[in-house]
Image: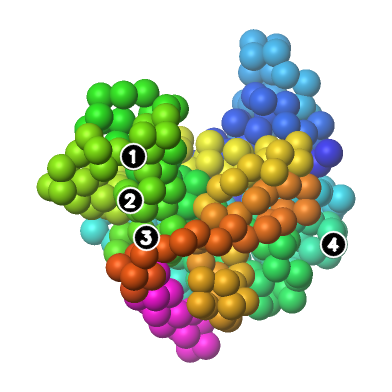
Amino acid sequence: MKVTVVGAGAVGATCADNIVRREICHELVLLDIKEGLAEGKAQDMMQTATLLGFDTLISGSTNDYSKTAGSEVVVITSGIPRKPGMTREELIGTNAGIVKTVCTNILQYSPNAIIIVISNPMDTMTYLALQSTGLPKNRIIGMGGILDSSRFKYQLSQHLNCSASDLNAIVIGGHGDTTMIPLIRLATLNSIPVTQFLDAEAQQKVVSDTMIGGATLTKLIGTSAWYAPGAAGAALVEAIIRDEKKLFTCCVSLDGEYDQKDICLGVPVIIGKSGCEKIVPIDLNEEEKEMFKKSADAVRSMNEVLTTI
Ligand SMILES: NC(=O)c1ccc[n+]([C@@H]2O[C@H](COP(=O)([O-])OP(=O)(O)OC[C@H]3O[C@@H](n4cnc5c(N)ncnc54)[C@H](O)[C@@H]3O)[C@@H](O)[C@H]2O)c1
């Protein structure tokens, strides 16, 4: 099994690090456009092999896609991250060109790869990847909901003073500060609805802190976060390679599901060896349906920007 991670920056390198530590694949290629960066980080990671006890082979490449040939899964993290005060949407002009070129290069050497898109604005970049490659929709998956759901569980655990791993909670909709929808009505602490423990004000606080989770970290760190995004990308790769049939929220192409068409948006899906194997319907209430529609409208207008660049 071979995996390629494009972009050896903060998120790409962390994702690669998580993949190799867990020996998810036999071979991992890290590729970046910046001379020597991927080779250097690959060597650094290989030098942890005896310390951490893994056998995955890691190599780096400066923009030479022949080294990525035959990859089963490719993770795209290349592009610029946001700075404090920026929205993910402001990255579109630069990142659209990068993501489109990377997809073309990848498919030249790995025509059967499943592509995971992490670069922001992720919903629009996933849509662009789907449109520009013409790949079947199960093979283009955007990573955002896994991260946002993990941040949602973190916020809940802080309020409930409980273990985050005892929580079940998902975020659907777009991967933007105003487009994501943490589904607090359906969140549970070991099957008990969290709404039993949190009053309306606390519920609202959890939801809004989740929505600005990424922006809060960008403000603190000075650039966008990488530990949780990298780990979330690796979890997605693992579910594909090990055919885990995991239920994650991922950004996938909708064709009538959730009353949406011609858009990629975060919904619960089953992830296995074919990529997105199934879109799972949720019985949303009227308020949630309205929020989902608003989220889709915002993402759709962002997608329209693609026609102008
Ligand atoms: N979807 C998510 O949940 C999520 C979470 C965090 C970050 N992100 C996004 O991921 C992207 C990467 O973030 P980061 O913090 O790792 O940024 P970074 O600047 O640390 O790394 C990006 C890397 O991409 C490389 N790159 C640029 N153009 C390239 C090209 N054409 N080919 C190959 N490599 C190229 C750069 O040289 C750099 O090393 C950003 O767009 C960020 O907004 C998404």
Is 303 magenta? The answer is yes
- Contact between marks 1 and 2 (CB within 8 A): the answer is yes
Give the mark nearest the N terminus, 1 or 2: 2
- Contact between marks 2 and 3 (CB within 8 A): the answer is no
Give the mark nearest the N terminus, 3 or 1: 3
Q: Nearer the viewer, mark 2 or mark 3?
A: 2
What residue did someone put label 1 on? 193
- Which quarter of the figure has residue 181? bottom left
Q: Residues within 10 Å of mark 3 (few under 14, many from 20)?
A: many
Give the mark nearest the N terminus, 4 or 1: 4
Q: Amino acid at mark 3?
A: Met
What residue did someone put label 4 on? 111
Query: Helix or strand or loop: what does disc 1 sit on?
Result: strand
**Residue at horizontal 30 percent and vertical 53 percent from the top:** 211
- Which quarter of the figure has residue 126? bottom right
Would the CB of label 2 be found within 8 Å of ligand 1?
A: no
Give the mark nearest the N terminus, 3 or 4: 4
Q: Amino acid at mark 1?
A: Pro
Query: Helix or strand or loop: what does disc 3 sit on?
Result: strand
